[in-house]
Amino acid sequence: MDDVVIRTRNLSKEYVRDEFRVVALKNANIEIHRGEFIALMGPSGSGKSTLLHLAAAMDRPSGGDLEVMGSQLNSLSDSEIARWRNRHVGFVFQSFNLIPVLTALENVELPLKLTHLKKGERMQHAATALKLVGLDDRMGHFPRQLSGGQEQRVAIARAIVTDPDILLCDEPTGNLDARSASEVLTLLSRLNKEFGKTIVMVTHDPHAAHFATKVRYIDKGELLPEGQAPEDWKALPN
Amino acid sequence: MRFLTLIVKNCLRNRRRSFLTIFSLSISLCLLGVMAALYYALFFGAPPTAQARRAVTRHKVSIVFPMPIYYREQIRKVRGVEEVAIWQWYGGAYRDSRDQRNFFPRLAVEADRLFKIYLDYQIPDEQKQAFIRDPAGCILGRSLADRFNFKVGDKILIKGDIFPFDLDLTVRGIYSSEESNEDTLWFNFKYLENALRNSSRLAAGTFTILATDAADIPRISKEVDELFANAPAPTRTESEYSFGLSFLSFLGNIKVILMSICGAVTFTILLISANTMAMSVRERVREVGVLKTLGFQSSTIMGMILAESAIIALIGGVVGLSIAQVLCIGIRQGPAIVDQTKTLTIQPPVLLALLGLSMIIGISSAIVPAWNASRTNIIDALRFTD
């Protein structure tokens, strides 16, 4: 296997909402290599989250090919995709999406319940992940007892606890104040640099994009060539 | 078991709602438990040990028609009959008969034979002898005595209605019984004999038979009835257990009534539970999307929701059936409509069946919301806001 983690060829996604056909992504071609930290930027509704969802196999493409970690996702059944996602993908949401009735430790343990690890091992892994994100003193706290930044760090711990190959982040700083956002971005950058995690991050925020090693733009469903930004956007240096 | 923590925590997510659901389920299951216990006792239960050996002979047409007293000696000759005694329903009125609280059965019985047939009656020997000796004596069940605060030596006046004379009785004893009802007043048949001397009205209402072996009851019943098949007063003999049940038929088709109530209760519980689960799952559509993103399969999510509903229903079932068992104890100690209620309890097979039913209700009420949630597309689930 080459070091391409995600490869798309003419990847498209169309939705039908009521009687309207909406093209969310048009013939997207991209190769993301192992160890890259890519920021996908573009205005709201441009299709960047759609590309991320397709890469995480959370949605099925309408056309084109999608290869992630050497797997042709189009050919997998729903249950195979679920297992694949648990093993290879960590996902970080804009709105954290922690389970409110579970503590930070239990939230992080959740993806490990789908593995063959025993309870003690699961707890040990979850505790290590929380320590990595600097929340080893908040293990017994429920989401409502944490700040937004802390919640997002728990969400990142949950995303990395299975040691996935790819970390997909959908506006991870969108709901955070500047200081918390900076902490989260620093953490993602550390995961990329120190642990070699491949990260794809969707963001509108040019400041957030600065933490990435590469920036790609999407506009009106089209993935623009490398180095090219929409006219009304100020391009960021790569 | 891996997901038990999450399932239990989801059950406790909205404590007030879970409590109210469990409460409503437990009330319904309590009602269902008492009904099922009654149904089982009436139609599947075995008669208590002492009662199993007893049979009752009555007029074939109706219990209101009397039979000649001489039948007793002919019945006694049937093989397997150990003892026979005459019963005669007196009726009458105690105090104000319009007040139903003053009602209790008043029966004339051959005093010396009563205790040979009702082996389960517990009464001090001196009271027993006093009753046998006194033609105007009577004995009362403990429950009846307590209800009216009767004591040994008290006088009881019963005004006649069926018979053209009043009863002036003296309480000679108070019996108790684990198996038979304790709400009856028995007075000495000699009282009737003395009052109706030379009258054609001196007859037997029923004959109570004690068989040497409970297994002989069907044969004895058949032989007794054959004995009087061509007599002016043909008979119908059946076990005392069945005889007691025949009184219930006056109320209508008890089986249908009980089954209808049980069916209505079950349907109501199903609706309550389904409504709660639908609300509970709807609140968590977004979380279902998150779980799927983490790699949870649709079947796992569906199983977790079904298990959650089953746990809530099972807790409701355990609480409700516990209350029902306590109610059964209360009913056992109250006035007995039929002897079967003296031993009313939720039998282990009924208990297991009802607990199973509560789980089935829980699971079936959650099938639709669980199925819908598990089939929801991840993107739609994550976009969901309630």
Image (tube, rainbow, N blue to C red):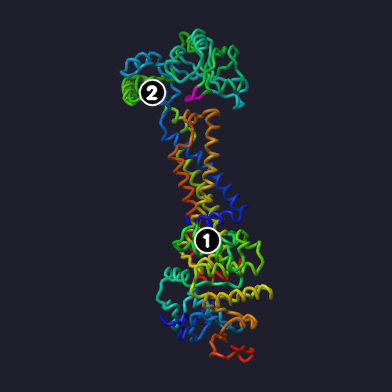
Residue A99: x and y in percent read 58, 63
What's the amino acid at mark 1?
A: Gln
Q: Position of residue A162 (x, y in %)?
A: 49, 68
| Residue B158 position within the rendered picture, expressed as x and y whole percent measured from the top left | 58, 17
Residue B253 picture location, percent across and down: 46, 38
Q: For mark 1, name the chain.
A: A
SS class of the residue under badge 2? helix
Camera-side residue: B107 or B316?
B316
Disc assigned to residue A124:
1
Q: Is residue A184 left or right of residue A68?
A: right
Give the magenta part as a residue range. B177-181
Q: Quadrant of residue B61?
A: top left
The amino acid beneath tag 2 is Arg
Q: Residues within 10 Å of mark 2 (few under 14, many from 20)?
A: many
Residue B167 horizontal side relative to residue A63, left or right:
right
As drawn, A105 above or below A189: above
The stretch drawn in magenta includes residue A98? no
Residue A190's quadrant in the figure? bottom right
Please tell me whether the stretch drawn in magenta is mainly helix, strand or loop. Answer: loop
Q: Nearer the viewer, residue A42 or B379?
A: A42
Q: CA distance from mark 1 to mark 2?
A: 69 Å
Q: Is residue A148 left or right of residue B350?
A: right
Quadrant containing the C terminus of chain B is bottom right
Q: Which residue is mark 2?
A: B53
Please state the chain letter of the residue tagged with numbered disc 2 in the rendered image.
B
